[in-house]
Amino acid sequence: MPCSARFFLAAFVLIAGTAVLGCDAGPGPPSNRLSGETSLYLRAHARNPVDWHPWDAEAIERARGEGKPIFLSVGYATCYWCHFMEREVFSDLDIAAVMNAHFVNIKVDREERPDIDEIYMTATQLITGGGGWPNSVFLTPDLEPFFAGTYFPPEDLPGRPGFPRVLNLLRDAWENRRDDLVEQAGRVAEAIRSFQRDQVASDGTAEPDDATLAVARSHLKTRYDAVNGGFGPAPKFPASLRIELALSAYERTGDRSLLAMATHTLDVMMRGGLYDHVGGGFHRYATDSAWRIPHFEKMLYNQADLARVYLLAFVMTGDTAYRAAAEDVLAFVQREMQSVDGAFHASVDSETDAVEGRYYLWSEAEITETLGADADVFLGRYGLTPMPGVEIDSDVPAGSGVLYVREEADSTGPFAGLEAMREVLRSARSKRKRPVVDPKVIAAWNGQMIDAFAYAGLVTGDGRYIETAARAADFMLDRLWDDELGLYRIYSDGAVRRRAFQEDYACLIGGLLSLYEASADSRWLVAAETLTNRMNERFWDPDTGGYYFGESEEYQLLRTRNAFDGARASGNGVAARVLLSLARHTGDTRYRTRASRLFSAYAASMKEVPGRFTSMILALQAYLHGEWDGVRTGDGAGGPNAAVGGAREVGGPNAVVDGAETGFGGNAKVEAYLNAVPGPRDGEFDATVSIRIEDGWHIIGDRTDVQGLVPTALTFNADLPIRTAAVSYPPADTLRFGFSDVPVEVYQGEIRLTARIEVDSRLLAEGGSLAEDGRLYATLYYQACNDAVCLAPEEKALSAPLDP
């Protein structure tokens, strides 16, 4: 299962010690090959002096013919640190001269080519233990990666080499130690292939059962953050799939702790800075544990997933605040992310004039000036969290911050009764320079949005939502479908681009099936069956079961699968749900049989790492026990980075781990044990995690300033509501390593982490409402290193009885 290959944290072990060489720069061309591309992200680099190629045969054959290594840069239009590197690095004439002289340079939009992104994000995580965008990878002409990183600055910084140094060291290594680099590249490529093979660990005969569902529920509890909501430590991502699993598992089992996890998380997300309280819609993630400071880009798939899960919570609980939040998200999408033709744009940028979040920040003075006499009412409901690191200039008033709902505010919903004030603020904000919208239409993400609007029409009875979904579906079938060639992934600038991947088929099928359920119009069911037949023909693996991510291509390192969930559901997980839905709607048992084969292919993996298979486990629950009233097929979309269990956008103080499980697991360098004993007062427990670290190894301390290293962290939750005091971490040792100019704080030997846990003592009494066996759960996050190697970040799930 999880890949156990280990590589040096910094591949500089192959190239370190070489002198940095200069290169005379000449003037760059007024435009390069990217000027003819339809991708907004690629076109943003069209005026670079770098001789960029798109990923195509010309670029790869040029590298092979000239015997040059390939520099591959992968990003997307709303990526903050991609913008940063474009401005500081790729626009520099001296840097571009070195790139052009010694490398074949390829630029890829990860949203257009998620297959390329997935392969080389896996490489970056294997080589460095982390990953993110921009993803910077150096390849042999045979497309095997030998060095990788993320954001590189234009000059050396503490803990991070500058890009000129990287280029010159790699140039020298390629000229003088090419065999070493090729050997390293071969090892990385084989590790990627092994990782792909390990996703299908069973022989196809295993039968997943209720035990898999029980393991998944237990995993939710170990990941849940009972203090702040969500799953896992900061940065906090809106884990819509896990919320849906908690809701559906509660409906089936009656375990109220699962319902509490879901509603707590939904509440803190819609009340915190993750939500845009003026314009509506959710930002991509929160950088802090309290959900106050977001990373400001808005992704279409987040709006679709979250609108749907808030509607599910409304169906489950009857709480109208959840319906209001969902409808506010849909209104934002219609207002700011829908094209005149009815399709949906991909994303809204996080920055304006190179300042992160500038468009969304407010000061109390601005609110008072804008709202006048109503300002006191608004500021009584909302607070402002100062935005760290923002560049304060004449356009960003001092004291600017991010709106959040105060804890003491009433619980009728974050903006109940304030609609008129929000409209005034929205009108005032619209006069500011707006963030750029990436206008491309992505088939998979549009399928998700069609699903959300159709489900909203079904839940609310408002036919206008169904009309919106139908209009978008008509656009997709009219513009992105070809009877002979099949589905396309991208529509941009009036033209289609790139044949669709399996996730595009699965997600659009899901949207069409939701539209059929909401409208009873059989043409949507017919279209869904047509797309499903084509998906099966092009992507199904008849040998092991399951779907490949894309079709076979000549210029590709390998043909990948999309089985692990990331920030979005995997293509295989979505396919399992739509196959079951088609079986139910058509009565054709072949769909259910294929779903059964898919479950069998991943049976062992689902039980071993359930957190990576949430979408498939939701489908498995429907397969074993039938659908529940709130949940229907067609949810989610496959994530291009699911295979690695998370990727990080790096370069600033808010490096993030995205969505899925961290680390590849499997090493035995660290042992940890949890113990909980009664505290001085009723309902209090003193929790201790004892950690033993193997001799010759250490784990990173609870804080680090070195990019690519993951600090030790501990989170708690239980079978009932708890309040956790701050975790107490011991003093760390300080060590120095060759890969970093700054010292690294580490733990060695044996250490103990402690925390005071408070619970309602009445729930511990006989006859109380404690669910299941009354246990305390903890998750330990850490990264183990020795003097030469840092393993991928890992986590350990721990538990202990709560015995009063």
Image (spheres, helix red, strand yellow):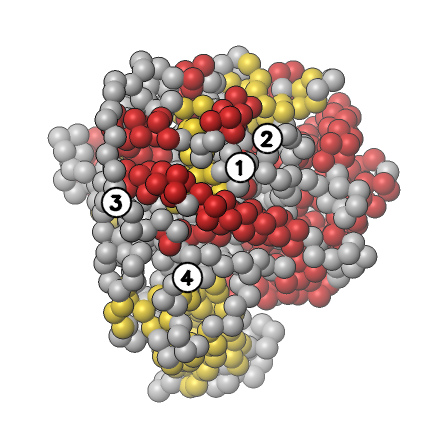
What x and y, as percent, mark residue 201?
70, 57
Q: Give whichever of 523, 6 is nearer the camera.
A: 6
Question: Residue 137 vs residue 4: left or right?
Answer: left
Q: CA distance from mark 2 to mark 4?
A: 32 Å
Question: Residue 456 vs residue 684: left or right?
Answer: right
Q: CA distance from mark 1 to mark 2?
A: 8 Å
Pointer 1: what residue? 143
Closer to the N terminus: mark 4 or mark 3? 3
Question: Residue type at mark 3?
Answer: Ala
User: Are there few (<14), some (14-19), or many (20+) residues within 10 Å of tag 1?
Assistant: many
Q: Give whichever of 643, 735 is nearer the camera.
A: 735
Pointer 2: what residue? 555
- Please tell me whether mark 3 or mark 1 is closer to you in this view: 3
**Residue lying at 31% horizontally and 30% vertically, measured from the top left:** 98
Work out whether residue 307 can be spotted. no
Closer to the N terminus: mark 3 or mark 1? 3
Mark carried by residue 790? 4
Asked whether the beta carbons under mark 1 and mark 2 sit within 8 Å of each other, the answer is yes
Q: Give whichever of 422, 440 is nearer the camera.
A: 440
User: Are there few (<14), some (14-19), or many (20+) residues within 10 Å of tag 4?
Assistant: many
SS of the residue under disc 4: loop
Pointer 3: what residue? 19
Whether 774 is drawn above or below 738: the answer is below
